[in-house]
Amino acid sequence: MSKSNPYPDQRRKPLWHGLGKRLRWARKQLNRSAHDLSEAAGLNHGTVECIELGCHLTPTVEDVERLAATLGSPVIWL
């Protein structure tokens, strides 16, 4: 008996799927700009904006860890 795939397109979603939306929500809760958050996390100025907009940028684990620490959020939540 095979398990049914929960994804109708038969592909698994990457772990970072939805990261941009969660990142934007957390950033706005703290009233921080994307530029400010990038700078505080030690990332290039456009990195947060690109992640939030869903550019073809796949963030590194280190980048996500930095963002989570800067936001005061658990990495697993992002």
Image (spheres, grey):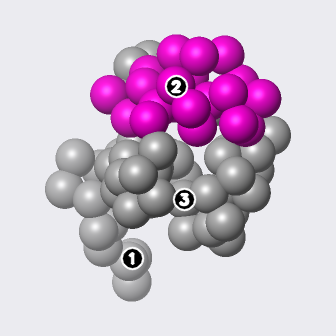
Q: Is residue 58 above or below residue 31?
A: above
Residue tagged 2? 35
Estimate how packed mark 2 is, as few (under 14), some (14 to 19) or many (20 or more) residues with alpha carbons within 10 Å: some
Estimate how packed mark 1 is, as few (under 14), some (14 to 19) or many (20 or more) residues with alpha carbons within 10 Å: few
Place of residue 76 in the rendered image (x, y in percent of width and height, measured from the top left): 64, 68
Please say if the residues under marks 1 and 3 sit with CB atoms less than 8 Å apart. Answer: no
Q: Give me the C-alpha separation between circle 3 and circle 2.
A: 18 Å
Which of discs 1 and 2 lies nearer the camera? The answer is: 2
Amino acid at dot 2: His
Q: Name the residue nearer the viewer: 57 or 43.
A: 43
Q: Give me the C-alpha separation between circle 1 and circle 3.
A: 31 Å
| Residue at the farthest bottom position | 1
Measuring 77% from the left and 29% from the top, which residue is drawn there? 42
Q: Is residue 4 above or below residue 23?
A: below
> Looking at the magenta stretch, what is its main secondary structure?
helix
Is there any visible trace of residue 13 in the rendered image? no
Residue tagged 3? 78
Place of residue 17 in the rendered image (x, y in percent of width and height, measured from the top left): 42, 48
Measuring 56% from the left and 32% from the top, which residue is drawn there? 36
Q: Name the residue nearer the viewer: 75 or 49.
A: 49
Residue tagged 1? 2
Is there any visible trace of residue 4 in the rendered image? yes
Place of residue 78 in the rendered image (x, y in percent of width and height, measured from the top left): 54, 59
| Residue at the farthest left position | 8
Place of residue 57 in the rendered image (x, y in percent of width and height, measured from the top left): 52, 20
Measuring 80% from the left and 40% from the top, which residue is drawn there? 62
Mark toward the start of the polypeptide (1 vs 3) = 1
Amino acid at dot 3: Leu
Mark toward the start of the polypeptide (1 vs 2) = 1
Q: Which residues are magenta?
A: 33-53
Could you say whether the residue bearing mark 1 is in a helix, strand or loop?
loop
Quadrant occupied by the N terminus: bottom left
